[in-house]
């Protein structure tokens, strides 16, 4: 059985999904990539936008999500934390 | 009679430099662990940061005590005698007892912290009990320093078991470095016991000990 994702894991999955798509993803794609329901994704997305990690932009009538500096910084710190926790068995 | 120094005379000061390196490495690990605690809010990161802070304070206490004893500063001061537990002791002995009690107690608590985080046993009750037990061990170690090293060896034995298990389950360079590092700490404490027979074991023990911290520094460089 797979372990339930923590809130931090979900945020990381969302942010890294945006990053992997060359920092530009449609909300529907993000929902599939981060394996979340529509309702839950919107709740997380609201938090990420409020915390200035993600920004919503419009291009040719389509809505896109892009990472802001704080979003990139979170990804870097989270990867370091995972490596630290893995190494020290935390 | 109280033994003030463990190593040969030519090694005075060199051991302090090696210990200062350990202080810095322990502080780096504590800093990162606390930073990750701020990021994730997980209790085990906080405990781990605390354990390594205790490590650094322990070595700092040892460095300060040794540097005062080595340079003979206390011998130039006429501070007279004081009474402790019914025994009359000199100021030099008093300083040594306080400094080394601090070093031993803080180091054992630091090791216990790592053990508790590793085995996920972070309860305040355990910490209180361990503090009392280690205090008794440290008082006994004043008369027979072997008590301290044996307690450290037992804790390090459990820590080694955990970290080698961690390495075999993940097979990563960093997990190997950490496992070897704690194994070397174990070896260094075994060597410190042998200083009873020759002061050269103290030198070898200190060198092995600093190598263990060089490996931990290597881990932090890889993670960074």
Image (tube, coloured by chain):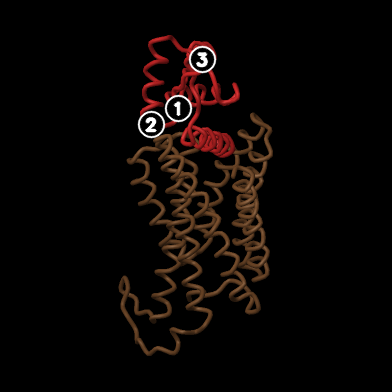
Badge 1 element: strand
Q: Which residue is mark 1?
A: A54
Q: Which residue is mark 3?
A: A60
Question: Vertically, is A90 above or below B214?
Answer: above
**Is residue B203 visible in this depiction of the protein?**
yes
Chain-order first, disc 2 or disc 3: 2
In front: B115, or A46?
A46
Q: Residue at x 47, y 39 (%)?
A: B117
Mark 2 Cα shell of 10 Å, populated few (<14), some (14-19), many (≥20): few
Disc 1 to disc 3: CB gap under 8 Å: no
Q: How many marks?
A: 3
The quarter of the image holding the C terminus of chain B is top right
Chain A shade in the render: red
Q: Residue at x 42, y 70 (%)?
A: B97
Mark 1 Cα shell of 10 Å, populated few (<14), some (14-19), many (≥20): many
Question: Vertically, is B129 above or below A60?
Answer: below
In percent of width and height, residue B39 lies at 43, 37
Query: Which of the chains is brown?
Result: B
Horizontal arrangement in the rendering, residue B222 relative to residue B142 (left or right): right
Q: Chain of mark 3?
A: A
Residue A51 numbered tag = 2
Question: Vertically, is A53 above or below A37?
Answer: below
Badge 3 element: loop
In percent of width and height, residue A40 lies at 39, 14
């Amino acid at each position: 059985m797979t372990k339930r994702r923590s809130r931090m894991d979900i945020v990381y999955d969302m942010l890294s999904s945006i990053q992997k798509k060359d920092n530009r993803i449609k909300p529907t794609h993000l929902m599939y990539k981060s394996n979340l329901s529509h309702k839950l994704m919107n709740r997380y997305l609201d938090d990420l936008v409020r915390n200035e990690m993600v920004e919503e932009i419009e291009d040719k009538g389509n809505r896109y999500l892009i990472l802001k500096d704080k979003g990139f910084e979170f990804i870097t710190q989270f990867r370091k934390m995972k490596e630290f926790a893995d190494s020290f068995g935390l | 009679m109280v033994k003030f120094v463990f190593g040969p005379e030519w090694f005075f000061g060199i051991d302090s430099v090696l210990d200062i390196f350990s202080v810095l490495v322990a502080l780096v690990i504590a800093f990162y662990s606390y930073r990750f605690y701020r990021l994730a809010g997980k209790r085990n990161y906080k405990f781990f940061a605390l354990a390594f802070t205790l490590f650094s304070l322990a070595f700092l206490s040892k460095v300060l005590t040794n540097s005062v004893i080595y340079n003979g500063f206390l011998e130039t001061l006429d501070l007279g005698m004081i009474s402790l537990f019914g025994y009359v002791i000199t100021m030099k002995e008093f300083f040594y007892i306080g400094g080394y009690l601090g070093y031993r107690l803080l180091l054992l608590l630091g090791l216990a912290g790592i053990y508790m985080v590793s085995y996920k046993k972070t309860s305040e009750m355990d910490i209180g009990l361990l503090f009392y037990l280690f205090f008794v061990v440290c008082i006994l170690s004043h008369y027979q320093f072997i008590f301290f090293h044996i307690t450290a060896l037992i804790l390090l034995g459990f820590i080694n078991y955990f970290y080698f298990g961690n390495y075999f389950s993940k097979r990563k360079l960093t997990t190997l470095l950490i496992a070897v590092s704690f194994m070397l700490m174990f070896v260094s404490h075994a060597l410190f016991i042998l200083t009873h027979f020759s002061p050269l074991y103290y030198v070898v023990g200190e060198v092995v000990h600093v190598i263990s911290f060089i490996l931990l520094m290597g881990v932090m460089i890889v993670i960074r």
